[in-house]
Amino acid sequence: MDNAENRGRQSRLQPPQVHAASAITGPTTACLQAISDSQNNARAQPTGIPQKRPHKGSVSQPEQKRKTLAEKAGEPLKPANPPMNGNLVRASSVKGSSMTSLAASRPPTSSRHAPPGSFGRSIGPTTRPTSTGRAPTSMGFVSPNTRPRGLTRTRPATSMAHREMEEEGQVRSGKGTEFPPVFPSRIPQSHKVRNAARQYSVISQSQSGIHSILEPSKCLEDVFLDNQPPENVQEGRVSDVPKDSSLPIKYCRDEAARGTPSQPADAQRPPPTTPTTPPTVTKFYAAYESAKAKTKSWSTLKASAFRNYYLCKDSTVTSFTVSDVDNRINQLDSEVKAMKETFDLTLADKQNMEAAISAEKRKVYDLEMERQHLMDHNSQLKGQLDLQRQENSSLQQEKQSLVFDLEAEQRRQKYAIEDRQREHKHEVDEIRHQFKGELDRLVREHGEALETLERQYHSKLADEHAQNSKELQELRSKLGAEQQDLNLELLKKEREIQEMRSQTEVLKSDLDREHTLKTALQQQIAEMTTTSMTLEERLRGLRAKIDFLESDNKQQADSFASMEARLQEALQIAEEARQKLIKEETERRVLFNKYQELKGNIRVMCRVRPVLDSTEGEEARIAFPDVKTSSQIDVTGPEEKSSLGAISRKVLPFEFDRVFDPSVHNEEVFGEISQLVQSALDGYNVCIFCYGQTGSGKTYTMSSADGMIPRATHMIYDTITKLQEKSWTYTMEGSFVEVYNEELHDLLTPGRESDKDSRKRPEIRHDDVRKQTTVVNCKTVALDSPERVEAMLKQAQNNRSVAATKANERSSRSHSVFILKLVGYNSATGERCEGTLNLVDLAGSERLKHSQAEGERMRETQNINKSLACLGDVIEALGRGSGHVPYRNSRLTHLLQYSLGGNSKTLMFVMVSPLEAHLKETITSLRFATKVHNTHIGTAKSTKKLGSSTPDSGR
Ligand SMILES: Nc1ncnc2c1ncn2[C@@H]1O[C@H](COP(=O)(O)OP(=O)(O)OP(=O)(O)O)[C@@H](O)[C@H]1O
């Protein structure tokens, strides 16, 4: 359609009559206005929807005679068909549904104005609320681009279609609801083609599922703008149009199409815009044009045959082709068949859609029911809430009233309490006042009574006091006299005690002196006895002389005087002799020490024990060749095999300070060491130790009943006793310790408590000034009698035995040291001396090389090896005169530090087993002893070397 033509036609449109317009209901007016706006604004916005058309197999129905606008206006208004409810509108957008089917499926009771809360309310054309925004509906008809509307404007029934078109524009022009084909003969070919194209599009799209209610409106708009629309087709929404609608707008169009004068509308309307032909339409237009050429004659014939309408003044039929009627009829029949098929398909679609609609309806119904149920529930809840609120408010009011009551009660109670307090205060004041008076009275009475009683008691007390004082005075005087007597007696006794003490002291000193003098006098007496005897002889001679000289007295007196002088001379000589003796004792000590030094500070002696019984095994070949000096021992060594296979045994000679054969007893042995014990008494540190393998006789030599220790102590007692004559007094203290695994243990502490508590373990302390060693945490026994020494040795032996029981042969694996401290004082000369005698029983030396011990035994062996090696190192260092002597390398040498060097004297006994089985150990011990012996200092023997071995005759 060209624009000029449209414009011309539109200009002929008459505005609706006022009365007719007034008869239109609100929505209809709004619909008209929307249509008008739509047409004026853009042709692309369709406003008309074709009326429901019957489709009963025929292509078209003969049109009813149309009434003019005036005729229509003259008719009474028919009641409008029920407006399309939401279901219908929604159904219009369902794929494949047609307007006819929609109209048919519309429920007869549906109302355009659905009740509030119904589903239709959300989409129906009801009056909108005066709001600027439109609430979205459940069906989603509201577009975000919805244009603003007037506040009071009624929503037209076709507004949905208009909005859809506004939103989607011409893009969706090819879509739409299927509607029956229209073949108006008065429609220009272009419109026919367009309608055919739309029809085709509708059919095809209905099958493809794309459908819209808007498209028919546009199609009709395109058609009816230029031509009269068929009856029952109304501009606007389908749902708004009744079946036999005769709305003024249609007649306006009719009038305009027929040229009936009408109100000029061009002045009020903007010129319509040229519609844009969609590409689909263009395509089908071309197809239709080609088909038109073929069916032109048929169309003409059809028009003449079926529709006299085509023979009107506007008819363009110019010729008729009669000869091809049958053919055309056949074609028509085929077309009709095709159309029938199309309608059948449409009907099927319709049924499908109806089923879908009914399903949706059910859903809607269910939703509606659910919503209704929810609303009911909500209303119930609301009711409950209201009830609760009412209850709450009533409770609040009740609470408020209670609060008021409570406050009032509190106030009342407060006032009552205050009143009570006041009353109580008054009462208390009154009572206090009364009691105060009463109290004052009672106090007064009490004071008076007290005063009376006090006076009475004072007088009584004064009497008693006087009496007591008198008695006390008497007693005091009595006690004073007694005390005085006692004091005097005490003083007397004290004086007597003092006198007794002084007398005792005097007697003691006299006794000492007498004791001293007694010895001297005994000598003097002896001398005097001799002298006396001589004198007696002389006296007898003198008596004879007296007898002879009886007559000569003077001669006798001279003789007595000379005798007196001789006696005095003898006494003087005795005193001089005593002084000389003391002096000689001191000189002896010096000379003895020098002698010991000349003999050497370290001496080595060898002792071979006897074979105890025959079960001990074969006896080794040990010889003692030097019978005179007894200083050599020859040991026949083990068998040796020469390169020629000859077996020989070497004789190994060893020479020491003294060698004791098995026949020598402890007494003789002690005779050799007694000089060293004397050195200890003289104030020297002496160390005597026994070295040798287990069972070689170390303990026997040292600690047996007649061993070195008891003999030394006995000798010391004897010497001390003798020295007392020379004004020497001695104190003697003994201690017995054991060195086991490089730890000191006290053998005199019962139970070995020191082993349990490390704080009580014996510790070595050296006094570098006095050159003395002290063992702290160690029991020291004052040995004031030989019995104490024996008891001490017994206890030490017991303790060591206990340990030996627990640790198996403990005595063989520990060093025992008997320490005897000797402190002497010479009261005559004031000399003082302090010496120590150490008697050491070393652990068995055989473990040095041949032990295969493990674990605890290995530790013991290592400690024994270490201590014995350290002892050898110390002795070697002393022999070399080394500035540093490694005393601290072992606990044993540390303990014996001041008994192994300096002015100390050391004696080593090397003990030898006589058995052949112990030969190796014997030779080892003798070699070690020789090494020590060769380190002698200041002795000629120290330079002695071992003599060459004399080969024994082979077997
Ligand atoms: N000169 C001797 N005369 C007689 N018997 C002796 C003599 N020497 C040792 N005996 C005996 O030999 C045995 C072993 O002696 P003793 O226990 O003194 O050896 P030991 O070297 O001290 O051993 P251990 O190292 O195990 O203490 C003892 O029975 C002892 O009485």
Image (cartoon, rainbow, N blue to C red):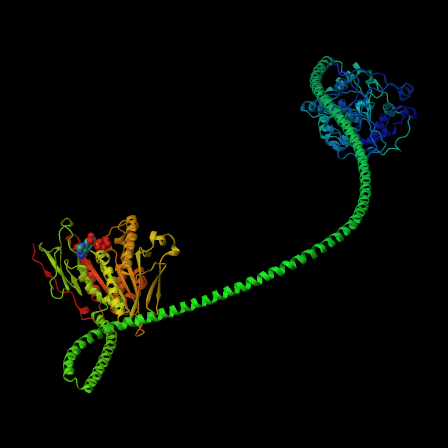
On screen, residue 615 versus residue 792, left or right, reads: left
Q: Is residue 327 left or right of residue 250?
A: left
Residue toward you, 632 or 463: 463
Residue at image location 55% in from the left, 63% down from the top: 476
**Residue found 89% across the figure and 27% down from its top:** 15
Where, by quadrant of the figure, is residue 835 drawn?
A: bottom left
Out of 199 and 462, give the one closest to the viewer: 462
Residue 655: percent from left, percent from top: 16, 64
Q: Nearer the viewer, residue 340 or 809?
A: 809
Q: Give the percent coordinates (x, y) of residue 831.
A: 31, 73
Is there any visible trace of residue 618 in the rendered image? yes
Q: Residue furthest top?
A: 326
Q: Quadrant of ligand 1?
A: bottom left
Residue 123 in sight in this render: no
Q: Quadrant of residue 784?
A: bottom left
- Judging depth in this view, the residue of 105 and 614 nearest the camera is 614
Q: Quadrant of the N terminus?
A: top right
- The image quadrant of residue 131 is top right
State the image coordinates of residue 924 (x, y, percent, origin top left). Answer: 19, 58
* Residue 575 % position (x, y): 25, 78
> Which part of the image, by quadrant, shows the C terminus?
bottom left
Count of number-bearing discs: 0
- From what the image shows, is residue 345 above or below residue 267? above
Q: Is residue 541 above or below residue 88?
A: below
Q: Is residue 197 left or right of residue 834?
A: right
Residue located 17% across and 56% down the image: 609
Residue at the extreme front:
551
